[in-house]
Amino acid sequence: MLFSSMTFLGLFLPVVCIVYFFAKQSIRNYVLLIASFIFYAWGGIDYLAIMILTILVNYTGAILLDKHRSSKKVILLITVILNLSFLIYFKYFNFLIENYNSIFSADVSFIKVVMPIGISFYTFQAMSYLIDVYREEVPAQKDIYKLSLYISLFPQLVAGPIVKYHDVNKEIDVRTVNFEKVSYGIKRFILGLAKKVLIANTLGAVADKIFSQPVEQFGILTSWIGALAYSLQLYYDFSGYSDMAIGLGMIFGFRFMENFNYPYISRSITEFWRRWHISLSTWFKEYLYIPLGGNRKSSVRTYINLLIVFFVTGLWHGASWSFVVWGLWHGLFMIIERRIGINKSYGSFIKQILCHFYVIIAFIIGWVIFRADSLSYAVSYIRNMFGLVSDHKIVFELPYYVDTIEIIAFAFGILCAFPLFRNILSVKPERKIALAGLNLFLLIIFILSAASIASSTYNPFIYFRF
């Protein structure tokens, strides 16, 4: 079930809110837990069974960690291996078989493995809880229902933000809900819905049309338009979903971390990763990069640690070498930036502009690798962007791919990628005219979003598969 679906907007969410707010404080966690299980089971009851097994493994592992501190390393290792085994089997099994067959010229049969929705997100959440208990930052949760709620909470279950246990464990026990929080949550949700439906979906159609063609059939300008369309689609798709998740969390009394902070204004790839998918990058920093040694040892060791982290980051996104190369692409730039000290001082205004231009080119090329169905297509597409494909047989000119509505979506997508409207939801109550204008604006974009959802069958969600 997508947040941007009429089933969720017209049925699931209203029913959950009514039951939740009329329920006694003492049973609201159970209301949310049942709602989260129903939400997840909507995509297949088998998926729910796998998630419940993950909950049981981590609940048991944490209890054992609490009781047997002398053996905590062994217990942690076993439980982490069990968590990763679920992830490896359901997400990477066929990828491993494919590469085994290729390397050893074998003919091992593939098994039809269907990946549970959002398994990468809830597995990482479960492991953060386990590691927090191992580090004695939080006590083991004795109430299995509360731990189940943490791992399965539907607002951020299938696409994040990845919520670390030590950030929300107190809110699971006690949280307050008031008019201000609910009001802000609704507004944040509507803003995210509009980003997803009105911008991401519109530009996604452009990207899909271009990337579905052989590169010889479109020219240089079209290839750049396709890459830019996908770059904006991915940002508004994912950040829009994060906005919706944060808004829903606020409605029910949870404060989730921000997941995006205008990443496309970055002046280095290092800064980009401080602004893009913040919950994932902080997870890797806290639970992988720092345990590996971070930057506390030699420069060479730091570079190796960065490559490991970005190799895993790429692999986390999908079972394909394209994702691995995309991750290493970013890791390589971070090593270069660290080596030349680009993040210590950006210098003059001209240098800042040049740095920003370099980052734009770097991440757009990276998104082409991320989007392409294969590495060979990605290489051909990038060559086409720089005029290195000579045997063009252009079938459709640019107007075929982009119409007036899509040009408007491009304009809004580029404009809103800058922090011009950062505080749009922070209008104070005493500013009645501004507040009325904001509420009218939100009502209009909600109606437009709902109308778009109801009238269109095109409603992809990129990060749903992770």
Image (cartoon, rainbow, N blue to C red):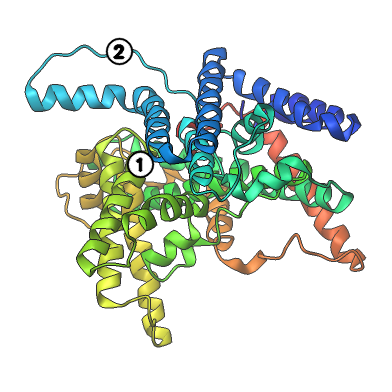
Residue 12 x/y as whole percent? 74, 25
**187 relative to 23 in the view: left or right:** left
Visible residue check, residue 461: no
- Mark 1: which amino acid? Arg
Does 287 sit above or below residue 434? above
Residue that appears at 84% across and 46% down: 177
Residue that appears at 63% across and 29% down: 148
Q: Residues within 10 Å of mark 2 (few under 14, many from 20)?
A: few
Does 352 sit above or below residue 34? below
Does 235 sit above or below residue 270? above
- Mark 2: which amino acid? Ile
Image quarter of residue 433 = bottom right
Judging by the rendered image, the residue that carries numbered circle 2 is 111
Judging by the rendered image, the residue that carries numbered circle 1 is 371
The Cα atoms of the two marked residues, 1 and 2, are separated by: 25 Å
Residue that appears at 31% across and 64% down: 334
Q: Which mark is residue 226?
A: none
Instruction: Looking at the picture, tell me which residue is in the foreground, 34 or 367.
Output: 34
Residue 311 x/y as whole percent? 29, 47
Image quarter of residue 364 = bottom left
**244 relative to 325 in the view: left or right:** right
Residue that appears at 66% across and 32% down: 149
First reached walking from the N terminus: tag 1 or tag 2: 2
